[in-house]
């Protein structure tokens, strides 16, 4: 049986999927996760900050996380840090299994007790 990217993304978008951001061997729960496909302004695949390639269409994650992690995230954000590090997310779905999502943090907006993350998805793999 062949599983398509769209069926995996549909499963990842399910309300029952549990997302966890993993950083420095510590797990942080992500809430209100939304995965969307966007059209980018590029006409051909383009290198973003010499870190990842982005084509005409890109997938992005918008998610909320506890606010106390924000100071640690500045080291992973593309742009302000010369020691840029990617974002690692584990997604546990009910029907497709467990997936590892690698991404690049685009921005963080802090609001009271939580922060909203915008992440560009650069890799998706099934975990055993």
Image (cartoon, helix red, strand yellow):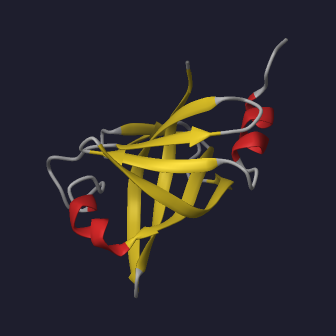
What residue is rendered at 48% in x and 49% in y? Answer: 20
Relative vertical location of residue 77 with respect to residue 126 in this rendering, above or below: below
What is the residue that sits farthest to the left in this orientation?
Answer: 82
Instruction: Report the quarter where the N terminus lies.
Output: top right
Label count reads: 0
Image position, residue 37 (x, y; %): 68, 51
Relative vertical location of residue 83 with respect to residue 53 in this rendering, above or below: below
What residue is rendered at 56% in x and 38% in y? Answer: 44
Image quadrant of residue 92?
top right
Relative vertical location of residue 101 with respect to residue 34 in this rendering, above or below: above
What is the residue that sits farthest to the right in this orientation?
Answer: 1
What is the residue that sits farthest to the bottom in this orientation?
Answer: 112
Image quadrant of residue 102?
top left
Image position, residue 101 (x, y; %): 51, 38
Image position, residue 59 (x, y; %): 61, 47
What residue is rendered at 57% in x and 53% in y? Answer: 60
Q: Nearer the viewer, residue 12 or 128?
A: 128
Q: Is residue 17 left or right of residue 82?
A: right
Image position, residue 75 (x, y; %): 20, 56
What residue is rendered at 59% in x and 44% in y? Answer: 43
Q: Nearer the viewer, residue 29 or 80?
A: 29
Q: Is residue 87 left or right of residue 81?
A: right
Instruction: Report the quarter where the C terminus lies.
Output: top right
Image quadrant of residue 70?
bottom left
């Amino acid at each position: 049986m062949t599983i398509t990217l769209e069926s995996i993304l549909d499963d990842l978008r399910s309300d029952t999927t549990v997302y966890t951001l993993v950083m420095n061997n510590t797990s942080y729960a992500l809430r209100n996760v939304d995965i969307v496909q966007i059209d980018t302004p590029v006409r051909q695949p383009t290198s973003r900050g010499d870190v990842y390639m982005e084509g005409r269409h890109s997938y992005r994650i918008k998610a909320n996380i506890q606010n106390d992690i924000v100071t640690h995230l500045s080291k992973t954000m593309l742009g302000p840090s010369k020691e840029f590090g990617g974002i690692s997310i584990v997604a546990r779905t009910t029907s497709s299994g467990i997936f590892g999502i690698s991404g690049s943090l685009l921005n963080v907006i802090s609001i009271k007790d939580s922060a909203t993350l915008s992440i560009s998805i650069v890799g998706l793999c099934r975990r055993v």
